[in-house]
Amino acid sequence: MENNDVPFDLIEKASEIIVKSGYVVVLTGSGISAESGIPTFRGKHGLWKRYRPEQLATPEGFAVNPKLVWEWYNWRINLVLNAEPNAGHIALSELEKMNIVKSIITQNVDDLHERAGSRNIIKLHGNILEARCIRCDYKMKIQKPFRDLPPKCPVCKNLLRPNVVWFNEPIPMDVLNRAYEEIERSDCLLVIGTSGVVMPAGAFPSIVKRNGGKVIEVNVDETHISWIADITLRGEAGKILPVIVEKVKKYLK
Ligand code: NAD
Ligand code: ZN
């Protein structure tokens, strides 16, 4: 999308809603990190060596072939370590510093919101830069891809696994509760770069609407959330969100 396609009139309306809201919460998906070079699962770069993420990011896939799963994670860990936050991540952290955005609920397992300076982040699906033992309590930070695959626990010698939530796995209760608390408080939800098909995050917009709040979507494509959104801003997060920050600043002057 070219710069002159940015829907300025709709951004103006969205910014007004954002400024007038009391408790703005953000929900992000892999689309916000796409402009940092981290591919989304659903889209043209979604395939890795002909495997679908649904085959690799599952407890079943790990049980069958932990080495293959770790090869895929090594590839993704490398992408994250070499990526930088983009203008979209930075715009969200600015909105938090202005005390407009209260929290970010992300489905992303990368650390780009943190590195952009956001503080109140709820990571629904865990952290790709951590590994944990499948048996004991051992957990470690990952600073570079593993050399010997699959990696083993230094304490009990069982397998290490990525500290992420896979398909068919529950989100840890404390994390989920924090997310629901934010969603219930929210009178304006910004939904950015998520297809809305992964649950429970896909249901958050309808909770905010049911409570009388507004939903604003930023996405390059139509999604499962578009029909429920009060405003849909069609375009790249890295182009749209900085314009929102500018408009919000003008309103606050
Ligand atoms: P998804 O892959 O299902 O959907 C991505 C969405 O982003 C799509 O709707 C697409 O139209 C949109 N999009 C793509 N580029 C965009 C851009 N520049 N600006 C705005 N929107 C853009 O992703 P999801 O909804 O997050 O769910 C899939 C799962 O994949 C999540 O569980 C997540 O943990 C995982 N995942 C995470 C990462 C990451 O951490 N960066 C990357 C890939 C997948
Ligand atoms: Zn162990």
Image: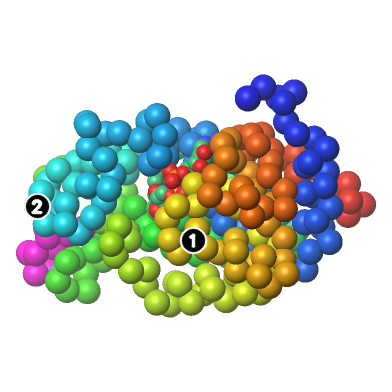
In the rendered image, residue 252, in percent from the top left (x then y), is placed at 88, 54
Taking the image as shown, residue 242 lies to the left or right of residue 171, namely right
In the rendered image, residue 61, in percent from the top left (x then y), is placed at 16, 52
Q: Which residue is mark 2?
A: 64
Neighbours of disc 2 within 10 Å: few (<14), some (14-19), many (20+) = few
Quadrant location of the N terminus in the rendered image: top right
Helix, strand, or loop for circle 2? helix
In the rendered image, residue 38, in percent from the top left (x then y), is placed at 42, 37
- Residue 82 against residue 14 in the figure, above or below: above
Answer whether residue 157 is magenta in the image.
Answer: yes
Residue 168 versus residue 226: which sits nearer the camera? 226
Disc 1 C-beta below 8 A from ligand 1: yes
Helix, strand, or loop for circle 1? helix
Q: Amino acid at mark 1?
A: Ala
- Residue 70 against residue 17 in the figure, above or below: above
**What whole-number distance in Å separates the C-alpha atoms at marks 1 and 2?**
28 Å
- Residue 109 against residue 8 in the figure, above or below: below
Q: Look at 48% across and 77% down and name the residue there.
A: 177
Answer whether residue 74 is magenta in the image.
Answer: no
In the rendered image, residue 2, in percent from the top left (x then y), is placed at 67, 22
Main SS of the magenta segment?
Answer: loop
- Which mark identifies residue 201? 1
Which span is picked out in magenta?
151-161
Residue 123 versus residue 2: which sits nearer the camera? 2
Occupied quadrant, residue 50: top left
Q: Earlier in the sequence, mark 1 or mark 2?
A: 2
Q: Look at 77% across and 68% down and name the residue there.
A: 22
Tell which residue pokes out farthest to the right in this image. 253
Can residue 235 be seen here? The reply is: yes
Taking the image as shown, residue 1 lies to the left or right of residue 195, namely right
